[in-house]
């Protein structure tokens, strides 16, 4: 996994960003969503189980479906970012993230919710290496890149910390569905804005092993 992700990151072409702050905001929001989605469902599990009539044993798959899909597809995400382009994978990952979140919120059966969570995990696996590589290729080595990486890392930490709190508030006031639907108005606008504010990079060599 490390070899493929490092191959994506190590390319030295630096894109010219006309709006570096907007680009960094988009990249940080993707990391925020990845981290937020890992913890936001914790408080909502009881409500999900009651509505879907799922026992405690199967509720674990609502959490594991995301983490297993994310970890298991991270290598694929890094390879796709290299072969198909980082911006393409960012747009695809965000679009898939929003779609999976929308479907999960409408789930009436446990398997639908678990499948939607797995879809979110796959989307996160596409986003993570593409986002990190974009930062390393769009911001110059030194203070500029260090600052971008610091903000990107803070977004991840903030997402993990805010997930449980936000999940509790949404579940209490709007219903458990909103712990999934809240991702949609973030993911889809980011996917659209990325086509304008993130650079379109060249594809990698498909023959390279």
Image (cartoon, grey):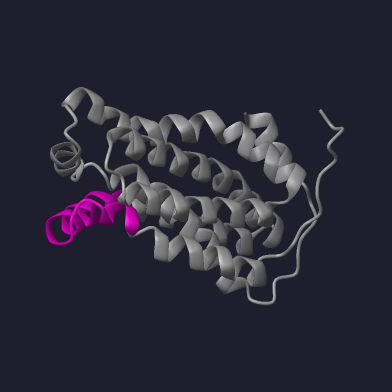
Residue 12 makes an appearance in the image: yes
Give percent across and percent down for residue 52. Answer: 20, 38
Give percent across and percent down for residue 23. Answer: 59, 68
Give percent across and percent down for residue 145. Answer: 62, 59
Left/right of residue 21 with respect to residue 106 in the rendered view: right
Give percent across and percent down for residue 120. Answer: 44, 44
Is residue 163 covered in magenta?
yes
Who's the residue at 45% across and 55% down the image?
A: 98
Main secondary-structure element of the magenta-colored stretch? helix
Q: Is residue 33 above or below residue 143?
A: above
Who's the residue at 31% across and 45% down the image?
A: 107
Which residues fall within the magenta stretch?
160-181
Is residue 122 covered in magenta?
no
Of residue 103 and residue 34, the one placed in the foreground of this image is 103
Q: Is residue 172 above or below residue 112?
A: below
Q: Is residue 60 above or below residue 123?
A: above
Q: Quadrant of the C terminus?
A: top right
Left/right of residue 193 with respect to residue 185 in the rendered view: right
Of residue 59 and residue 125, the one placed in the foreground of this image is 59
Residue 140 makes an appearance in the image: no
Q: Quadrant of the N terminus?
A: top right
Taking the view exactly as shown, the residue that stands out farthest to the top is 57
Who's the residue at 38% across and 58% down the image?
A: 183
Left/right of residue 28 with respect to residue 116 in the rendered view: right
């Amino acid at each position: 996994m490390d070899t493929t992700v490092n191959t994506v990151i190590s390319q030295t072409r630096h894109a010219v960003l006309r709006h570096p702050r907007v680009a960094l905001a988009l990249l940080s929001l993707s990391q925020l969503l990845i981290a937020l989605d890992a913890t936001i469902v914790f408080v909502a599990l009881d409500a999900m189980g009651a509505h879907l009539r799922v026992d405690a044993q199967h509720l674990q798959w609502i959490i594991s479906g995301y983490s297993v899909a994310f970890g298991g597809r991270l290598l694929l995400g890094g390879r796709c970012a290299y072969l198909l382009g980082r911006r393409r994978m960012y747009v695809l990952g965000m679009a898939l993230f929003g779609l999976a979140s929308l479907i999960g919120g409408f789930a009436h059966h446990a398997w639908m919710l678990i499948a939607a969570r797995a879809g979110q995990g796959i989307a996160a696996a596409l986003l993570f290496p593409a986002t990190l590589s974009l930062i390393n290729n769009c911001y110059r080595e030194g203070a500029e890149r260090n600052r971008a990486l610091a903000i990107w890392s803070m977004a991840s930490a903030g997402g993990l910390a805010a997930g449980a709190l936000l999940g509790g508030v949404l579940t209490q006031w709007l219903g458990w569905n909103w712990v999934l639907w809240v991702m949609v108005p973030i993911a889809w606008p980011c996917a659209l804005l990325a086509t304008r504010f993130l650079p379109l990079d060249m594809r990698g060599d498909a023959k390279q092993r």
